[in-house]
Image: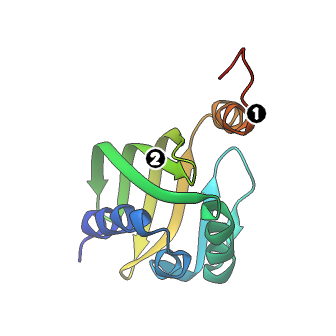
Amino acid sequence: MDAEALVDRFVAAWSRLDADELAGYFAEDAVYHNIPIMPVSGRAAIRDFIAAFVEPYSGAHFTVHRQAANGNVVLNERTDTFTFADGGTLDILVTGVFEIENGEIRAWRDYFDLTAVTDALAEHAAPATPGNA
C-alpha cells in the first residue's frame, strides 16, 4: 500500500474512535505532534493519548479538502469534526503532515489553531442561559 492510501485508510478509521485500531497504524517508535502542544512518542503513548482525546465524543468524521503526496510524505488539509454525546459538534481546521515508513506512520504532525479549539470547547461546556441558549 502506498503512503497516500495508508493515510486515506487512517483518516477514515477515525470514524470508529477506536484508539487501539488507530494506534495500530503507527510505527512502534512513532511521534505524533499536535504542533500547539507537546509531541507524543511511541505507539503505546499515542494510543493512550488518542483514547483520552476521543473519550468525550460519540462520533468523528475527517473531511479531506486537499491532499498531496511526494514519496513517503503526505500532506492534507482537513476539517476534523467530532460529535459530543449531546449531539453538539467540534470542527477543527487542520493541516496534517504524515511520514510513512515500512507501511506505518513514522511521524504525524497536525497544525491547527489551539485558541479556536479551546474557545469552541469552552462554548460547548458553557451552561445554557437565557443569553446564550
Q: Who is closer to the viewer here, 103 or 60?
A: 60
The residue under label 2 is 80
Amino acid bearing label 1: Pro
> Looking at this view, is 23 or 59 the one in front?
59
| Image position, residue 132 (x, y; %) | 68, 19
- Residue 49 vs 102, above or below: the answer is above
2 and 1 marks in contact (CB < 8 Å)? no
Q: Quadrant of the N terminus?
A: bottom left
Left or right of 44? Residue 58 is left
The residue positioned 65% from the left and 47% from the top of the image is 35
Quadrant of the rendered structure where residue 32 is? bottom right
Between discs 2 and 1, the one toward the N terminus: 2
Q: CA distance from mark 2 to mark 1?
A: 24 Å
Q: Secondary structure at mark 2?
A: strand
Establish if 125 lies above or below 58: above
Give the image quarter of residue 4.
Answer: bottom left
Question: Residue 49: x and y, percent?
Answer: 68, 68
Report the front residue among 57 and 69. Answer: 57
Q: Callout 1: few (<14), some (14-19), or many (20+) C-alpha neighbours within 10 Å?
A: few
Name the residue: 47% across, 58% down: 59
The residue depicted at 64 percent of the width and 33 percent of the height is 120
> Can you identify the residue that label 1 sits on?
127
Image quarter of the C terminus? top right
Q: Residue at x 28, y 54 (%)?
A: 69
* Crowding near the residue tagged with mark 2, few <14, some 14–19, many ≥20 C-alpha atoms within 10 Å: some
Find residue 86 and name its label.
Answer: none
Residue placed furthest toward the front: 130
Secondary structure type for disc 1: loop
Q: Position of residue 37 (x, y in %)?
A: 73, 50
